[in-house]
Image (cartoon, rainbow, N blue to C red):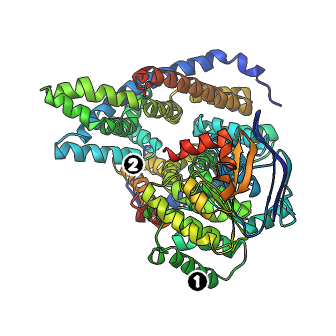
Amino acid sequence: MLDLSSMSEHMPAFIDGFIITAEVSIISILGSFLIGLVFALMRVSDNHIFRTISYWYVDLFRNIPFIVLIFFAYYGLPEVGVYIDAFWTGCLTLSVAVGAYAAETIRAGILNVDKGIIEAAKSFGFSKLKIYRKIILPIALTTSVRPLGSVFINLILTTSILSAITLGELTGASKIIASTTFRPFEVYVFLVFFYGILTFALSGVIAIWHRHLNKYNEAN
Amino acid sequence: MIEIDKLCKNFGDLEVLKGIDLTIRPGEVMSILGGSGSGKSTLLRCINGLEEITSGKIIVDGLDVSRKSELREVRKKCSMVFQQFDLYPHLTVSENITLAPISVLDLEKSEAEKKAEELLESVGLTDRSHYYPAQLSGGQKQRVGICRALAMSPDYLLLDEVTSSLDPEMTAEVLDILKKLAGQGITMISVTHEIEFAREISDRIVFLDDGKILNDLPTSEFFDENGGLSDPRIAKFLSKMSGR
Amino acid sequence: MYGEQGFTAYDFVLWAEGLGVSVGIFLASSVFGLAIGILIGLTRYYKVPVLGKLLMMISEFLKNSPVLVQLFLVYFGIPALLEIDITPIQAAIITLTGNTAAFGAVIVISSVEAIDTKQLEAARSFAMDEWLILKKIIYPQSVAIAIPLVVGLAINQLQVTSLISVIGVVDLTRVGDIVNQRTFEPFIVWPIIGGTYFILAKLLGLLGARLEKKFSAYRYQAGI
């Protein structure tokens, strides 16, 4: 029955896969955060065109399955002369797709900032840019840590779909292990637990970080 | 008749009621007074089976509250009005009042609605039957709460600090209704902070202190210098309450 | 494979079939999943010993691992372990049902817990039994709270169905893949497929808004 011992000799392959998952995740988290930040700022700006573009970007990418996006990118990019491998296609698509979720989360954080604080800052004659950089964004990001964390944990789970475009990340590597050991049940159970523990650990880290950032709120 | 015999109620290690003996006769209007934490609300909730009894017995018209099969019958006889009104927010005023009569007493819907209309009229809320609770003021909500309890045609009406969440103006409108009711022969057991109100409507006052009955007297004797007031704890409580 | 043939009328039939498979599996797994999710939520709410905790633990793992891996586990793993045959469609429905149930249970629990428990006590004091309270008090209020959350979940699960293409179910995404491989027109194929999902999601959203209005009359009237 359940026999995990056959997994042990394949650990190096599994770890290789994990390293790729980690790399893609880190790059895409950074990418989606930056994209999300830009579109969130566009969404709350006074410029009508910016707001419209941001609205459609978020609406579109939140309502189209990731696998459709990744196939589009994987087959479409070479057609327009962009030749990048599965790894970078994955990073790019993940950043753009998850950026939509990040934008929504950051926007909610910005809208949550107390209007009184912003007016107080204006009254001191800060420039708009300064107000955003020094006051609005730091407060917004503090409150957004937890929801952003969920978005990024989802991103990590989504990296598994990159196996569909032949990337040998965790899921892709496990697929190969499963077919060479003929023990697919053990391999995938192990993988479910592995992802599960990884996300639990990350949620724990995010919770601690959130508490740390919101220390000043505790007195209330 | 409600007979309470050596009633004890613990919450974990905390003893809230420490042996209550009390008999309430039909038609009596009784007020239970006492400081916060004296156990007066718990006593009321035990009568309706909302709190499980730790030891002792409560018998309502021969029915044992701690027996599940008999509790249902007890609850049909004893209706309760709550401090926070606790109306069902998703139902209209009329539906709030008719839900239990229709589903528990098997009343016809039209009959239950007619009765609800009459009750609402008697508390001055004729035109509010299709409102939702959130659209009413606190005093109006509590008047609906009273109608909801009366719609069950209860033999006993249990009032759990029904004015504690209301401002003075609204308190007056609710107390007026209860005064009218007290004159109509229904058995009323009221846990309250409103000393004057208790004095005006009750036949009998029970004073609870630290989970025990300290005093159980006819109203006139309770407020007499040589009766209840001779106990320093009661005198202190009353002066504190009227000083508010 | 690189035949670069143009589109044919049959591609439209394929698209329609794929759409049917996606919607069908989405509906089946949503209905089963929500039903099971409600049961899980209720075992938790009524504090059923062992079962309540166990089901919640399984849900946690279903929520915290990729659906794709769960699909592989069901489609490749379970047949190997139990020596039975599972078709891709069966594997798809089983997996998505489990996944929807896990998220559905969370919604059920949070919407039931959002109800003020003191009114339940009031109902009990009027001799209403637990079933009646569930039906008349808990259900209508928690449904009103749950609808927007369920709609959000449904829109998400609709997208998740696209993963079943990977285990060979010929759904909308798989049809896109097939036609793309033949015509090699990614800029036509994928926008059409993506657009179809987008429109489906918007329709779900509209339906949800309607239901929400219907079930939350008491909240809207009160201006809450």
Residue at the image position 49 percent from the left and 48 percent from the top = C156
Residue extending farthest to the front is: B226
Residue A5 on image: x %, y %: 77, 20
Secondary structure beneath dot 2 equals: helix
Disc 2 crowd, CA 10 A, few/some/many (<14, 14-19, 20+): many
Tell whether label 2 touches label 1 (CB within 8 Å): no
Q: Nearer the viewer, mark 1 or mark 2?
A: 1
Quadrant of the image for the C terminus of chain C? Answer: bottom left
B99, above or below C44, in the image: below
The tag on residue C41 is: none
Residue C165 on image: x %, y %: 55, 47
Q: How many marks?
A: 2
The subunit carrying tag 1 is: B
Secondary structure beneath dot 1 equals: helix
Q: Amino acid at mark 1?
A: Lys
Residue B145 on image: x %, y %: 57, 65
| Quadrant of the rendered image containing residue B2 | bottom right
Residue at the image position 63 percent from the left and 65 percent from the top = C136
Residue at the image position 47 percent from the left and 74 percent from the top = B125
Judging by the rendered image, the residue that carries numbered circle 2 is: C190
Q: Amino acid at mark 2?
A: Trp
The tag on residue B114 is: 1
Residue B164 on image: x %, y %: 53, 52
Asked if residue A82 can be seen in this view, the reply is no
CA separation in Å, label 1 and label 2: 63 Å
A125, above or below C188, in the image: above
